[in-house]
Amino acid sequence: MKKYHSLFSMFILVTFSASVLAEAEVKSYVVTQKEKKFSEEKLKIKVGDSIDFKNDDPWFHNVFSLSDVQNFDLGSYPKGQFKTVVFNKEGKLDVECAIHPQMHMVVEVTK
Amino acid sequence: MINSICKYLFLGFTLMMALSANAASKKTDPYLRPIPVPYPADNVPTAERVELGKKLFFDPRLSGSEWISCATCHNPALSWSDALPTMIGNKMAKGNRSTPTILNTAYNKMQFWDGRAGTLEEQALGPIQAPGEMHQDLDELVKRLTAIEGYRAAFDVAYPDEGISKQTIAKAIASFERSVVSTEAPFDRWRMGDQKALSESAKRGFKLFEGKANCAACHQAFNFADDGFHNIGLPMSGQEDVGRFAHRKVKVNKGAFKTPTLRDIDLTAPYMHNGAYNTLDEVVEHYNKGGVTLDNLDPNMKPLNLNDQEKKDIVAFLKSLTGKPMALVVPILPVR
Ligand SMILES: [Cu+2]
């Protein structure tokens, strides 16, 4: 019983502090895809931050990451649209476009 | 006498002015070939390297059978391809992909239909070793070439401190390939201002290419490529080929292949990675339908509703991309 109790209080503590942190510091960034380039080659962000990947080209892009830290596949979407990725793990990610492999950027997620 | 010298000076001067004006306007037109061909810092394409690479490219002794050269499949008389729907290699075995032209491969950021090689240096050793293509052991090849005095001399001049190795074989071949670039086509003369270089039909075709037919979503700038991979919904033939997906496991890559150049396209039938089409009319009809196999189709592909005249116009434009024949001196290979 005692064990459960301490686990429970720890849970409360963790969620509480995370939400405080989240409110205080979470940022959202915009990275555009234009002329087959990402607007940033390298972006340093914090755990919990998010990036909107916005297509500014008149053809489709398909942003993805197969990194160990976190992987995602945003699918293909046309000009003007964006999709948001929340980065919730620490580490370095290679983000690429599946259609145009020369499009590459690094997202560095720190605590 | 002085008068005529002055005349020549003046002529030279105006020529220079014209050329530099031309160079300036060339820079701004993405459809004209950028003058410098890109190459890696450790492999400047000197005349000696290009010449050596040409020898290697035409030499059947690069293959295990000593019977197949790069030029067997990338035949300059067939616009550096083979006029086959799919390639035939070692022991006459049929492959399941077609032979692309090597024209303008210097400008590719990725090589092969599925982009599995980055540079031409990386690419060159692939077909030599591939069991279905030239089926040659590289160490064996280095030994074989080292035994030929003419090659020892040629490598000495081209790569003085490097000797004969896998690396220098690849570098020399890549240097030669960098010299195989498209030449001026009627389309280019039209871009530079010669209104008569293109028929009205071809001009309309180009407008459709950039507009209603949406070809320029993928076939871009002077090489009419995008270093990109797309599933354009070709009719299935033979066993399934997942294309780019084999190297990057992202859904969109399933059945996606590299956008090929359209330079000299009238000369390189049959078309597509699986040789699905024999004529440009068939290709345009394919796009007009918005593809045939619609599974995992690239989202840029849609039915186009082109009328017969519009289809003809696009084909006329594609035919205006044929350059002047390239002068090629067949190399004399060292026999000993
Ligand atoms: Cu892209």
Image: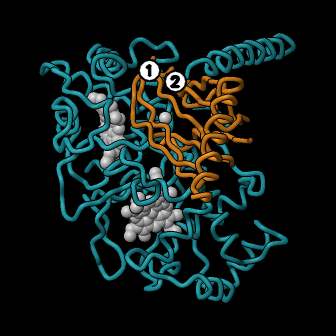
C-alpha separation, residue under disc 2 versus residue under disc 1:
6 Å
A52 above or below B2? Answer: below
Q: Can you tell me whether the CB of the residue at mark 2 lies under 8 Å from the nearest atom of ligand 1?
A: no
In depth, the one of B44 and A86 nearer the eye is A86
Disc sitting over residue A54 in the figure = 2
Q: How many numbered discs, if any?
A: 2
Disc sitting over residue A23 in the figure = none
Residue at x-position 44% and y-position 20%: A81
The answer to whether the residue labelled 2 contacts the one labelled 1, judged by CB atoms less than 8 Å apart, is yes
Identify the chain drawn in orange. A
Query: Which amino acid is tagged 2?
Result: Lys
Residue at mark 1: chain: A
Q: In this view, does B273 lie to the left or right of B246?
A: left
The structure's colour scheme is by chain
Q: In this view, does A62 lie to the left or right of B152?
A: left
Helix, strand or loop for disc 2: strand
Query: Which amino acid is tagged 1?
Result: Gln
Q: Quadrant of the C terminus of chain A?
A: top right
Residue B214 position, x and y percent, is 32, 23
Q: Colour of chain B?
A: cyan
Q: Name the residue under label 1.
A: A81
Residue at x-position 23% and y-position 28%: B302
